[in-house]
Image (cartoon, rainbow, N blue to C red):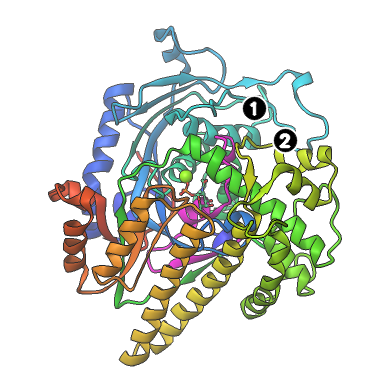
Amino acid sequence: MIAHQPIPVFHTLTDVFGSEEAALPHAKRWNDLAAQFEVRFGRKPTYIARAPGRVNLIGEHIDYALFGVLPAAVERDILIACGSRPTQSLSHHAEIPDTPGSVIAENLHPKYTRQVFAPAVKEPQEVSEQDAHAESWKLDINTKELRWESYVKAGYYGVLNHHFSGVENSPAHVDLLVTGSVPAGSGLSSSAAMVVASTLAFLAVNGKVGDSLEDNGGHKSLDKGGLVELAMKNEKRVGVNSGGMDQAASVMSDPSSALYIRFYPSLTASAVRLPTRAVFVIANSLVVADKALSAKRGYNLRVVETLVGARILAQAVGLPIAPVDRITYREVVGRFAGEQPGADMGADALEAAITRLEPRLDVLKPSVTDGVQLGVTMEEMVQMSGLAPDAFHEAYLSWVDIEATRFQLYKRAKHVLTEARRVLQFRRACVEVEAAASSDGSEAALIDSLGRLMNESQVSCAELFECSCPELDDLTRLARQAGAYGSRLTGAGWGGCTVSLVAEGKVTEFIQKVKETYPPYKNLEGTALSEAIFATKPGRGACGQYIY
Ligand code: NG1
Ligand code: MG
């Protein structure tokens, strides 16, 4: 079980990358970071946390409906060099708060300025009594605007509240320095990489990451699954109600394969071998998704549309649900097919159940003729949910900030169910490719079918989930014209990257053709071009290096 493995701890870079040869291309970046840490903080870092970005091969916007997804970590990553700051050095810095756990966070990128902050212990009246895991620390995180240190703070927040019970057991003062090679706002999940790396950095500085799960002074160290769950909660602190795909991919990936990640009945990840005769190529549309705006009118709105739709569908197929139960589509499909809560019916039965449930989605259409394009109003939606307005607000709106006058319940549901089925089909085809690898003919046909599923996913994202944009539509079309088996947006969408499946040996030609036809690439050469469009293979998940 990948989820129960310890988080890898390494003492040399060769260990991190598997061999001296593999470590070589990365050595300069790691060494420069450690050297800069020493310049800025006057001593060596003790630990470097590393967390990669990810590319999602298929399964978009279905993680928060608890359906399985199929991402892989990319080689691009976030590195955080860190170390605890001796208390006596505090007196030299008037600006540093003298309370426990103060942080100086710097970034090698000059755009991201130095930040100094400290958490505070909550007053007894601020700790909620109903909460079994009463949080004893507070830390201001700005969710109104996008700020780089918010991701650092998000990681810290969870570590504080899960591992420190208050001043008696107080956190170290920390200095840290960040560098990253995952482009921001590109759908490669720089945000999850930041949160995972930050969570790991604060755990390590405070002695909470061990070589094995048991050797941490008699305490159990966090395993990979624990880190994913902590990072998922942490990232929600930045204001996005995300599913757990990115954090899971960043933590649990393995260089040999992509990951099939499931969230129901519990978080599990299993390796999926990819065909060796085809390569995934990432191409950035160079449109940067506006995360703050797309949260209100995009991401968070989709989360609400998806959850409300699931409740309405559940009722329509006769499943009783309590007003407070925010049932997901995955649970509706399961219960509809007679699956016991918490049980797992298996991929084939799930696929069959999705197909049987699909015609029932008509209940989500607006009552007016041709209303599918229009969507339903808030009033209609509340009425369809069967909840009183107050209860509806409490269950679906009170925890999220959204902006909309119409809600597209039917289109979103149609995307979610068909995309969930495509993931199951994609995974099955990968398994069959592996089995058929010896016979050329059947492997070619299976790779074609992977491409077809990716293309269908793009159409569904564009037309039903409406998370594409004109540039992503163009770029995926041009990729197909340049010979890709299939091409689709990856990540949240509304800008960012695409992923295309291309025959091995045709990658250079493919990249050249896309460069000639996608207008924003026309003037890109050398590194600028290879930053925008590049072949990728699955990379190692999050890990850390101790420096002595
Ligand atoms: P990106 O593209 O990294 O913002 C987001 C969500 C995922 C998933 C995808 C869409 C976050 C942190 N991640 O990814 O959980 O829902 O969109 O499939 O918000
Ligand atoms: Mg993100």
| Residue farthest toward the front in the current orientation of the protein | 369
Provide residue 398's location: percent of width, then percent of height.
72, 35
- Which label is found at residue 148? none
The C terminus sits in image quarter: top left
Provide residue 375's location: percent of width, then percent of height.
63, 51
Query: Which residue is at the front of the view, 435 or 316?
Result: 316
The N terminus sits in image quarter: bottom right
Seen in the picture, residue 319 relative to 107 is either above or below; the reply is below
Seen in the picture, residue 89 relative to 303 is either above or below; the reply is above
Q: Tag 2, which secondary structure?
A: loop
Question: Residue at the spot x=61%, y=39% of the render?
Answer: 404
In front of the other: label 2 or label 1? 2
Tell me the kind of residue under disc 2. Answer: Ser
Q: Which residues are magenta?
A: 235-262
Query: Which residue is at the front of the view, 423 or 303?
Result: 303
Gap in Å between the C-alphas at discs 2 and 1? 34 Å
Seen in the picture, residue 471 relative to 137 is either above or below; the reply is below
Provide residue 323's location: percent of width, then percent of height.
84, 48
Residue position for label 1: 169
Residue position for label 2: 398
